[in-house]
C-alpha cells in the first residue's frame, strides 16, 4: 500500500485533488482521462481499484500510461488506454462515471472543434456522472488577450489558446443540462494566463 502522498496521488492536478479530498468521486467506478498524457492524474484511481481508462493522441504518452497501469494496477486491462482524440473516442454512450479533461479543451482549433470535443465527452458520461475539466479562459484577463480568430487568442505569456468566457461555460452548462457541483474557479497566473476549473454533473 502506498505510504506517501506522492506515491498515493502522483503529480495530480491540485483541483482534482481537492475533489478527491471532498469525497466527490467515491462512488464512481469507471474513470476516463481525456488527454491522459502519461497518466499523472490517474495514480490515485489506479491505486484504489477503479476501472481506469485513458486516451491521448500521442502514442508515446499512451505507452507511459500503460506502463504506469502495469505497475500500479496490473488487473486493469492495457486495452483501456488508446491513441485517440477527444472527439473520436472509441467508447459507447453513457459508459463512464467520471471523465477528467485536464488542459485539453483549450487546444480546440475553433468553436466547432471545441463543441465536437465537449459533446463527445458528454456522450460517454453516464447520467449522474461527473465531468472535471481545467481549461484556459479569459476570465479576469479579458482586456489582456488578443483575438486571432476562430475563438483563439494570443495570451500575455506568448502562447495561443482557444479561450472560453464565464458566459460560454454557463451557456454550455445549461445546454447540456449539467449541474455545477463546484462553482467555477479561475486561477490567474500573474496576468499571463488564466485557468478555470469547470465541474459538471450530468443530470
Image (tube, rainbow, N blue to C red):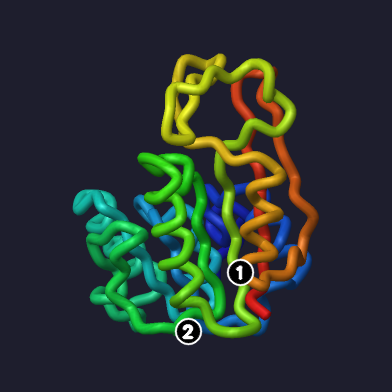
| Left or right of 164 in this view: 52 | left
Q: Secondary structure at mark 1?
A: loop
Question: Which residue corresponds to mark 2?
Answer: 94
Is the residue 30 above or below the residue 170 in the image? below
Asked which quadrant contains residue 187, the reply is top right
Q: Nearer the viewer, residue 153 or 182?
A: 153
Q: Nearer the viewer, residue 5 or 13?
A: 13
Q: Residue at x 54, y 83 (%)?
A: 126
Picture quarter with the C terminus = bottom right
**Does residue 104 appear in this view?**
no
| Left or right of 155 in this view: 38 | left
Q: In the rendering, at what x and y percent does residue 107 appear?
A: 41, 40
Q: Residue furthest left?
A: 59
Numbered-mark total: 2
Circle number at residue 176: 1
Q: Residue at x 51, y 68 (%)?
A: 99
**Does residue 188 appear in this view?**
yes
Circle number at residue 128: none
Picture quarter with the N terminus = bottom right
Q: In the rendering, at what x and y percent does residue 82 appear?
A: 25, 66
Q: Secondary structure at mark 2?
A: loop
How far separated are the C-alphas under marks 2 and 1?
14 Å
Q: Residue at x 64, y 31 (%)?
A: 138
Kindly check if marks 2 and 1 are in contact, taking CB atoms under 8 A apart as contact. Answer: no
| Label 2 CA crowd tier, 10 Å (few <14, some 14–19, many 20+) | some
| Label 1 CA crowd tier, 10 Å (few <14, some 14–19, many 20+) | some
Is the residue 125 above or below the residue 15 in the image? below
Q: In the rendering, at what x and y percent does residue 48 appear?
A: 54, 76
| Left or right of 77 in this view: 133 | right
Q: Residue at x 56, y 44 (%)?
A: 135
Is the residue 31 above or below the residue 41 in the image? below
Amino acid at each position: 500500500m502506498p505510504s506517501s502522498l506522492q506515491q498515493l496521488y502522483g503529480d495530480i492536478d491540485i483541483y482534482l485533488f481537492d475533489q478527491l479530498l471532498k469525497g466527490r468521486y467515491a462512488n464512481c467506478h469507471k474513470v476516463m482521462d481525456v488527454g491522459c498524457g502519461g497518466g499523472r492524474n490517474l495514480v490515485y484511481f489506479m491505486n484504489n481499484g477503479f476501472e481506469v481508462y485513458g486516451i491521448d493522441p500521442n502514442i508515446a504518452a499512451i505507452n507511459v500510461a500503460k506502463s504506469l497501469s502495469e505497475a500500479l494496477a496490473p488487473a486493469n486491462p492495457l486495452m483501456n488506454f488508446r491513441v485517440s482524440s477527444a472527439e473520436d473516442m472509441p467508447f459507447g454512450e453513457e459508459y463512464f462515471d467520471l471523465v477528467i479533461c485536464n488542459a485539453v479543451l483549450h487546444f480546440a482549433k475553433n468553436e466547432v472543434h471545441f463543441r465536437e470535443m465537449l459533446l463527445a465527452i458528454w456522450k460517454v458520461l453516464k447520467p449522474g456522472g461527473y465531468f472535471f475539466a481545467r481549461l484556459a479562459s479569459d476570465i479576469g484577463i479579458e482586456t489582456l488577450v488578443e483575438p486571432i480568430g476562430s475563438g483563439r487568442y494570443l495570451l500575455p505569456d506568448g502562447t495561443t489558446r482557444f479561450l472560453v468566457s464565464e458566459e460560454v461555460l454557463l451557456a454550455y452548462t445549461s445546454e447540456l443540462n449539467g449541474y455545477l457541483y463546484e462553482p467555477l474557479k479561475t486561477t490567474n497566473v500573474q496576468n499571463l494566463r488564466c485557468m478555470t476549473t469547470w465541474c459538471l454533473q450530468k443530470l
